[in-house]
């Protein structure tokens, strides 16, 4: 194998990518199937002067990375289902205070303790709406190690550009599948540095005053500018405010900065979509099964295509609508009861031609699971 | 510097009720910091939710007003990232010992160099007077209309058991001693806890037959005694105040620096 060729788990690919993206600070709490991420960082981070801390619970793991990030560090935590539930309040705090950070959720079967630790994709909606109150969020996913790497780097980049928590929604199959990873060379992938204010010491710095392009340059908390950070509605100084004008402006800012950049944020992969009669729409490890079905059927002359979503939130509405318009029917392939199915139905002009092929029993979704649905749609029975 | 120089006047008036002890604690904290001569730029204040936590906004330091109970976790992130900063975490008794109890004992166990000031008024004030983990047995609250049947934490014993390396108790009545204790707590290298009994005349006072804030302050005077005084022998119900414990122990951030050295040697 070449120097840059690794044979690793998805969780390891995630760790390599975070280090590539310049991670300084990781906090976590043991939970399968994401624990390898914490274990690896405890070994790797101090080697380069970074900080690793195992916290007393999932909640504090989320809080501690927000504190670290505010001081100017790139920070991350990783968890799975139940832990993701516990982190939600603090994720909302990161949204409100516009603190960049990355949260990995390696999905396992739920609800509750559920199926430790079989595969599931049941946290799609929780990633979107898990924290209370109106807000927007960025959520990325990946189906293989190379993409885990790319999406992890992208998660850090987007978190810095939009000053927002970014969720990496992986799943147990992706996290534990051992496969090839070709490590990009330094500089090969874009790594976004934190945008820092040019306001000098002694001059008034407004932590929440957006520039003309909508971005908010940061000043390392604890550095030369003293300012207030609060989870309350706040004005441009970071001081609490219940003035309706300010509240209205802040909510719009928090939502628009992400929803208004959907095109820029969203990424998809397309396989045989141009002449497809039937379009599979999938993401995460399910997309591996979907791709297998598509390639297999193509070999038999059937015109199947695959739209693999790499960004789940904001949802790539326009791409989905455009790709679904010419096809006879679309099948969403996912391991839940149709969380992305409903988003697709909302996005397309004819929701009646969108079907679901799913698996929710803890087993990985197989090509047969998809083919059974395909046969029913095609009127062939199963 | 004058006390005024530490205050963000644009933030005033503050939200505290007339007679509240929290302003006394804030004033004492300012004086302690001023006596120590620490630069405003070197101080980070992290708070959670509750009346006491509003201190954050009023003071001209680096201030982080977080979620209920988790201030110490946020503070840990700031401190571990920038160990050169002085971290102070003002908390209420509910914030610190109920919803945040886990973070309190674990910050103590790690002995991370943070000063926790627990402003104990034995009640949830901001939500209107519900009993807290430091409301005594038999006391009244809006959620204990027949009297509280929960047993109160002894905060000093709790954090001693958890491993805090500086533990003290004082009251809003004993201001000069509070300032000295706070100076020592802030200077101490390790996790310091100062419990300050701070009166809430509006909610605790009303429910428990204290006619005024002055009555509550007098109560702190008559019902507390310096650690080791003879009075305690005569009247075991007296609450002791002073510095209970102070010990130099390996501090978390310093220990982590050693980990970095060890890991770097490995190549």
Image (cartoon, rainbow, N blue to C red):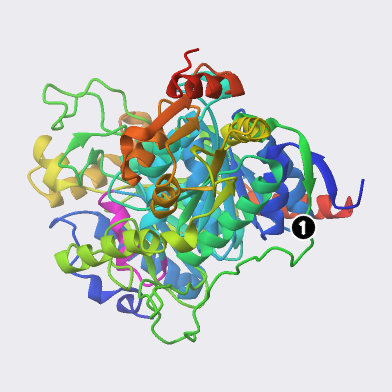
Which quadrant of the figure has residue A85? top left
Q: State the image quarter where residue A39 is shown.
A: top right
For residue A358, above or below residue B94: above
Question: In the depicted view, which residue is nearer to us: B97 or B77?
Answer: B77
Q: Position of residue B25 (x, y in %)?
A: 31, 58
Please say whether residue A104 is visible from this viewpoint: no
In front: A270, or A11?
A270
Q: Which image quadrant for residue A290?
A: top right
Lateral position of residue B130 relative to residue A115, left or right: left
Left or right: where B205 falls relative to A382: left
For the view shown, which residue lies furthest in the top direction?
A382
Task: Note whether A358 is above or below A61 in the view shown.
Answer: above
Q: Is residue B136 above or below residue A39?
A: above
Q: Is residue B37 magenta?
A: no
Residue B218: give x, y in percent of width and height.
Answer: 19, 48
Q: Residue at x 55, y 22 (%)?
A: A371
Seen at 42% across and 87% down, the residue is A203
From this view, report whether residue A122 is shown above or below residue A317.
Answer: above
Q: Is residue A153 left or right of residue A184?
A: left
Where is residue A375? Give x, y as percent. Answer: 50, 20
Highlighted magenta segment, given as a residue range: B50-62
Number of marks drawn:
1
Q: Which residue is mark 1?
A: A184
Q: Is disc 1 placed on a helix, strand or loop?
A: loop
Most extreme residue toward the right is A1
Coordinates of residue B182 in the picture (x, y in percent): 44, 58
User: Which quarter of the figure is the N terminus of chain A placed in?
Assistant: top right
């Amino acid at each position: 194998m070449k120097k840059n060729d690794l044979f690793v788990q998805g969780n390891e690919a995630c760790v390599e990518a975070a280090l590539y993206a310049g991670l300084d600070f990781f906090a976590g709490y043991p939970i399968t199937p994401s624990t390898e991420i914490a274990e690896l960082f405890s070994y790797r981070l101090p080697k380069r002067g970074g900080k690793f801390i195992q916290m007393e619970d999932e909640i504090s793991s989320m809080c501690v990375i927000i504190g670290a990030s505010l001081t100017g560090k790139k920070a991350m935590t990783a968890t799975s289902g139940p832990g993701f539930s516990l982190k939600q309040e603090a994720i909302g705090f990161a949204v409100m205070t516009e603190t960049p950070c990355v949260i990995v959720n390696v999905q396992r079967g739920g609800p509750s303790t559920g199926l430790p630790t079989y595969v599931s994709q049941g946290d799609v909606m929780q990633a979107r709406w898990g924290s209370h109150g109106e807000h927007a969020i960025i959520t990325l996913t990946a189906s293989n190690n190379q993409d885990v790497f790319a999406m992890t780097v992208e998660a850090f980049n987007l978190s810095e550009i939009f000053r927002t928590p970014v969720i990496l929604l992986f799943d147990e199959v992706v996290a534990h599948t051992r496969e090839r990873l070709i490590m990009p060379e330094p500089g090969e992938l874009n790594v976004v540095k934190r945008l820092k204010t040019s306001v000098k010491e002694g001059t008034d710095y407004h932590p929440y005053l957006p520039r003309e392009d909508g971005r908010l340059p940061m000043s390392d908390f604890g550095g030369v500018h003293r300012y207030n950070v609060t989870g309350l509605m706040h004005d441009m100084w970071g001081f609490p405010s219940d003035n309706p004008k300010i509240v209205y402006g802040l909510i719009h800012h928090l939502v628009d900065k992400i929803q208004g950049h959907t095109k820029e944020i969203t990424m998809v992969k397309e396989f045989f979509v141009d002449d497809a009669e039937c379009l599979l729409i999938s993401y995460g490890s399910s997309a591996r099964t979907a791709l297998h079905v598509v390639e297999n059927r193509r070999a038999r002359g059937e015109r199947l295509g695959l739209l693999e979503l790499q960004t789940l939130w904001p949802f790539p509405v326009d791409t989905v609508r455009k790709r679904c318009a010419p096809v006879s029917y679309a099948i969403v392939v996912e391991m839940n009861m149709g969380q992305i199915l409903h988003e697709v139905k909302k996005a397309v002009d004819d929701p009646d031609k969108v079907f679901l092929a799913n698996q929710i029993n803890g087993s990985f979704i197989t090509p047969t699971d998809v083919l059974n649905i395909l046969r029913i749609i095609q009127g062939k029975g199963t | 510097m004058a006390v005024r120089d530490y205050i963000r006047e644009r933030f005033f008036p503050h939200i505290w009720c007339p007679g509240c002890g929290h302003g006394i604690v804030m004033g004492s904290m300012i004086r302690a910091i001023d006596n120590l001569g620490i630069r405003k730029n070197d101080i980070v204040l992290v708070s959670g939710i509750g009346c006491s936590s509003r201190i954050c906004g009023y003071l001209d330091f680096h201030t982080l007003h977080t979620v209920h109970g988790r201030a110490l976790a946020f503070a840990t992130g700031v401190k571990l990232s920038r160990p050169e900063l002085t971290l102070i975490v003002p908390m209420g008794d509910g914030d610190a010992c109920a919803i945040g109890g886990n973070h309190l004992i674990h910050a103590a166990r790690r002995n991370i160099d943070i000063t926790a000031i627990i402003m104990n008024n034995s009640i949830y004030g901001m939500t209107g007077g519900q009993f807290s983990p430091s409301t005594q047995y038999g006391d009244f609250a809006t959620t204990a209309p027949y009297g509280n049947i929960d047993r109160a934490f002894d905060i000093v014993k709790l954090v001693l058991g958890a491993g805090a390396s500086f533990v003290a108790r004082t009251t809003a009545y004993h201001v000069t001693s509070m300032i000295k204790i706070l100076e020592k707590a802030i200077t101490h290298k390790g996790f310091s806890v100062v419990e300050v009994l701070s009166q809430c005349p509006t909610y605790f006072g009303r429910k428990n037959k204290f006619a005024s804030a002055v009555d509550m302050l007098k109560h702190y005077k008559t019902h507390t005694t310096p650690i080791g005084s003879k009075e305690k022998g005569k009247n075991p119900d007296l609450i002791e105040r002073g510095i209970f414990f102070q010990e130099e122990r390996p501090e978390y951030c310093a220990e982590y620096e050693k980990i970095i050295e060890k890991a770097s040697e490995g190549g």
